[in-house]
Image: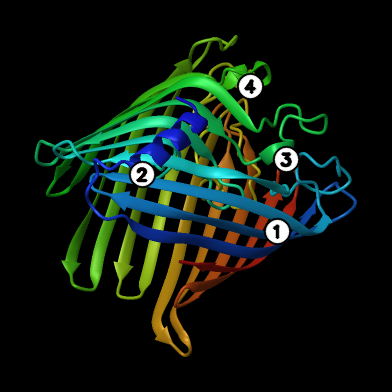
Amino acid sequence: MNVRHVLLLAGGLVSSPALADPITLKPIVDARIRYEHVDQDPVARDADAVTARIRAGVEAARGDFTVLIEGEGILAINGNYNSGVNGKTAFPIVPDPQTIGLNRAQIRYRGLPKTLVTVGRQRINLEDQRFVGSVAWRDNEQTFDAARIEWSAIPHLKADVTYAWSNRTIWGIDGGNRFGPARYESIDGKNIFANLALTTNVGTLTGFTYLVDQNEALVLRNSSQTYGARFAGAHAFTPKAKLGYMLSYARQSDYHNNPNRYSADYYAADVTLDLAALRLGGGYEVLGADDGVAVTSFQTPLATLHKFNGWADKLLVTPPDGLTDAYGSIGYGWKKAGPFDAIALTAVYHRFRSERSDRHYGDELNVQATFKRGRTSALIKYADYKADSYATDTHKVWLSLEWTI
């Protein structure tokens, strides 16, 4: 079923006289303006990108059915940057190309006991988005043409299974042109994402399978099969003191038409300690390598990658010798501070090394401040990557303002 079929079916459902329930409408608006500055060695010119993004649509509900339609447009107000598909290679890359299109077009059905079925172009965020996510940090998010079933008929147990025949990338309508031939607008395939989660008093244990089929010539090496488990939970010592924890392990190997033959391990541990408004955290993540050949290390091409391994985005593709990321963080938040409903400050420090041969790649400092008032939020963000044996020194600064309903 393609998006055109979804739209035709949606029109039939909304207009069907068999559905006697009234139609309720909910508007969708998400507007953002952002400035991103990038100073990257050895690129001679700095990037200064000012972009505006608006998503607008409507969600119509009637009986057990919900229909959602959402369009999106992105404008480069200041185009002094390499969007990845605009050919301005004298600048560092800021992957927010101008584009316009259909972001989501989906139907949901809740008529079966403890079951939610979603069909069409949709946003999919699984667990912490380490393997599958919507890449919400970028202006043009990643969505999927997919059918998804979420089932929770047995207490404390939830099954979540998706079949996705296409993922719509962040590159927009110019993806795949002569400036970015490996940056497709969409990538067809036969992807399967399956999670089975058991909730206990001490946390949630999730077993997962991700079969990634990147069925386009220039990205075949991203096809992989990943099997693993994740345990995450929290324990409150007092109303103002809470410990959070996460452990994860996975094994990945080649899949479908991938010409490489490889296998690699993944494991991660993370802890956070909340003491009233103060949060302390730390963790260690390993994306393993096989024999040091490119794209034979553990890869997560469908993840929300900006969340992991530093905001400078130097390690979006796992290096051939793998990656270890040791990190620590500190944060503090205020509620009802001056004119704001909330203010939050966060700082994170990463130390990156290779998993194979244990070389020091580099270090990175991330700092962020967020401000929220009503439906409006503002952000100031900074990333500083200091290279040793991988990539190059890179500094990034962001300023953004967002309004949603």
Please rate how many residues cluster around mark 2, counting C-alpha atoms within 10 Å: few if below 14, some from 14 to 19, many from 20: few
Q: Which residue is mark 4?
A: 219
Give the mark nearest the N terminus, 4 or 2: 2
Instruction: Locate the N terminus by quadrant.
Output: top left
Q: Label 2 to label 1, Cα distance in Å? A: 50 Å
Mark 2 or 1, which is nearer the eye? Answer: 2
Compared across the picture, whether 175 is left or right of 281 comes to: right
Q: Which residue is mark 3?
A: 391
Q: Position of residue 339 (x, y in %)?
A: 48, 88
Give the mark nearest the N terminus, 3 or 4: 4
The reply to whether dot 1 and dot 3 touch (C-beta < 8 Å) is no
Q: Is residue 172 above or below residue 252?
A: below
Mark 1 or 3, which is nearer the eye? Answer: 1
- Callout 1, which amino acid? Lys
* Residue that appears at 67% across and 39% down: 171
The reply to whether dot 2 and dot 3 touch (C-beta < 8 Å) is no
Name the mark on residue 396.
1
- Foreground: 56 or 86? 56
Name the mark on residue 15.
2
Q: Position of residue 364 (x, y in %)?
A: 61, 53
Q: Label 1 to label 3, Cα distance in Å? A: 15 Å
* Residue that appears at 52% across and 27% down: 166
Mark 3 or 4, which is nearer the eye? Answer: 4
Instruction: Locate the C terminus by quadrant.
Output: bottom left
Label 4: which secondary element: helix
* Residue that appears at 40% across and 39% down: 10
